[in-house]
Amino acid sequence: VHIVHVLSGDEPDWQGERGFITADIIKKYSKGDTSYFICGPQAMYTFMREELKKLDIPARRVRFEVFGQAKDITKFEGYPAELKDETFSLTVMFGISETVIPAKAAESIAVALERAGIRIETACRSGECGFCRTKVISGNYYVCPEGDGRRAADKEFNYVHACAAYPTGDMTIRIPIM
């Protein structure tokens, strides 16, 4: 593991890299099949995604710490903003049980489940991704591009991460039993 500290603040005695973590700095310290682990505020993630694009680094070699749902999903490209004030029916299947709850279009499925008192593991708030993997049986949804940690097979077989998926119509899902 090679860690490079980059200081963006004003510290006169700092001898290391300064400014933001740019494509030039990444290129300077990268060798071969480097993997990148990025942790910081959401604004940094947006900036870093653009810098990484400049270097054509495959997504499989980049990991971002995750923090749960986006602060304002309506700001993301492709989100159907005309639905932001809508509430849909979410049929939730778990084990042999089934219940129907309301789900707001501008809140993630995980938040709808929590609001209804249905427990789903969401370790994203502590930096882990994938615990809230949920099977979509039917219905339409939007997945936040910045929080979409799904593998290709998950996309193909209609799984979402409940913390990054937003209903855009009535849905039926199957969640893991806790």
Image (cartoon, grey):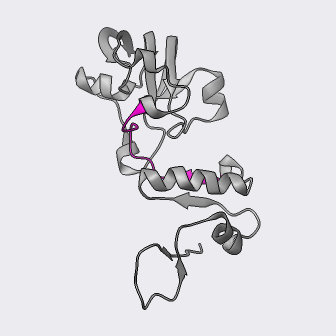
The image shows residue 38 at horizontal and vertical percentages of: 52, 58
Q: Is residue 114 left or right of residue 175?
A: left
Foreground: 131 or 59? Answer: 59
What residue is shown at x 54% (from left), y 24% (from top)? 159
| Quarter of the image where the N terminus is located | bottom right
Is residue 138 depicted above or below 177 in this figure?
A: above
The segment highlighted magenta reads 61-73
Q: From where the camera sits, is residue 77 visible?
A: yes
Foreground: 96 or 117? Answer: 117
Residue 117 among those drawn in magenta: no
Q: From where the camera sits, is residue 177 visible?
A: no
The image shows residue 165 at horizontal and vertical percentages of: 46, 27
The image shows residue 171 at horizontal and vertical percentages of: 44, 10
What residue is shown at x 61% (from left), y 65% (from top)? 22
Is residue 90 depicted above or below 113 in this figure?
A: above
The residue sitting at the right extreme is: 32
Main secondary structure type of the part rendered in magenta: loop
Is residue 120 depicted above or below 97 in this figure?
A: below
The image shows residue 127 at horizontal and vertical percentages of: 41, 50
What residue is shown at x 70% (from left), y 70% (from top)? 30
**Residue 148 placement: quadrant:** top right
Residue 62 among those drawn in magenta: yes
**Residue 151 placement: quadrant:** top right
User: How many marks do you count on the picture?
Assistant: 0
What residue is shown at x 55% (from left), y 35% (from top)? 145
| Quarter of the image where the C terminus is located | top left
